[in-house]
Structures are given as C-alpha cells and as structure tokens.
Image (cartoon, rainbow, N blue to C red):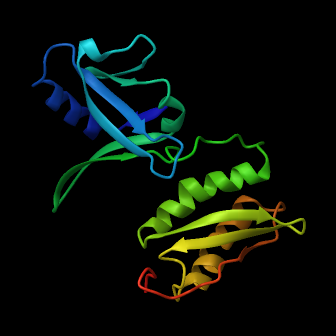
Amino acid sequence: MITISEGAQAHFRKLLANQNEGTNIRVFVMNAGTPNAECGVSYCPPDAVEPEDLHLPFDGFEALIDPQSAPFLEEAVIDFVSDQMGSQLTLKAPNAKMRKVADDAPLIERIEYVIHSQVNPSLAGHGGKVTLLEITEEGYVILQFGGGCNGCSMVDVTLKDGIEKQFLELFAGEIKGVRDATEHQRGEHSFY
C-alpha cells in the first residue's frame, strides 16, 4: 500500500525516539477524493489508535492509516531526501485526489482518473487545470482548460504535445484525439 524508503524509515525512527513509548506515525489524507486533497504524516500516540486503523509494520515503528484514507493512499511513497539545499520528507500519493480505478473500468472513469492524478497536478504549477466535458461518439476527448491555462499562449502545445500524446498512449485504440472546447480569454489569470 505505502512504500516508505529506508531513509524515511530512519528519519521516523529518529523522531520517534524522542516521543513517548508506543508512539507511531499516522499517514492520512484530508479531503480525500477531491481536488483539494492533502496528505500528511503525524505522530500517533497509543491513545489515538482507533480499532479500525490499518497497521503497517516497519522496522522500529508502525504506520497507522484510517479506513477512509486507505484507498487514496494506494501506491503512496514517503521518502527522505537530502541535497545541498537541506533535507526534506516527501509524500507522494498519486491517488489522493481520486481513488484509483480498475483497468477494466469504463473509459470515462479511467480518463477522469488520469486527469486528476497526472494531468492536473502537472498543470497546477502554472495555476491551471483541465476538466473533462465529454467523450464524443467519434472518440474525441473534449477538455476545458481553466485557471492559468485559460488564455495561455502555450495551451496548444500543452494540449497536443502533452495531454493528447499521453492519452493516445494510455488509451490506444479507445480514443482518436483530444480537443479543447475552451473559449480562451487572456487576462491577469493567464500564465505566460
């Protein structure tokens, strides 16, 4: 379910050594399954453990997960990286904003999943996002750009070289292309 790197495990052991005996870590998702989902890690003292918590054993501690967060933490990775800028704990949970869908799920659900787990997180750095409007009978995915993407001079490149290329690879034989239905208006919100 969750991968915790050796470096992150060592970091947690070091932090937990200064806590009360029996304290572990809790990994959770707030606003799970929404565009505002946020993942976190906190201390979990013995009196905060709930009977329905999932216990994941690691070397020297356990990671506890509440049942509501569990499906959104599938394939999550916690790492501790050090570089010349310092050290940092990272938590990447690709399914936090939307629960992973099965490979045989309807096409629209699989496309929505890719939008929420891969496309929109990439566009968020520019304040942008896309929304799926429809999949036409001819096999075209119709998207609407929003935020910083609306009016951006690079939207065509993002659409054709980024999103469409990715979708044609992921959904080969199921779709013919991706089209933009946005009426782009440049403004202060646009990313240039």
Q: Decide: is 132 above or below 14.
A: below
Q: Decide: is 79 above or below 188.
A: above
* For residue 69, side relative to residue 173 (left or right): left
x, y percent for residue 144: 65, 71
* For residue 103, side relative to residue 153 (left or right): right
How many labels, in total?
A: 0
x, y percent for residue 113: 63, 51
Q: Decide: is 145 above or below 59.
A: below
Is 107 in front, or is 166? Answer: 107
Res 192 quadrant in image: bottom left
Q: Residue furthest right?
A: 137
Please tell me which residue is depicted at 22% across the width and 19% down the height of the picture: 23
x, y percent for residue 182: 65, 78
Please tell me which residue is depicted at 13% across the width and 24% down the height of the picture: 17
x, y percent for residue 57: 37, 20
* For residue 38, side relative to residue 48 (left or right): right
* For residue 127, side relative to residue 163 (left or right): left
Q: Decide: is 77 above or below 138.
A: above
Res 183 quadrant in image: bottom right
Res 131 quadrant in image: bottom right
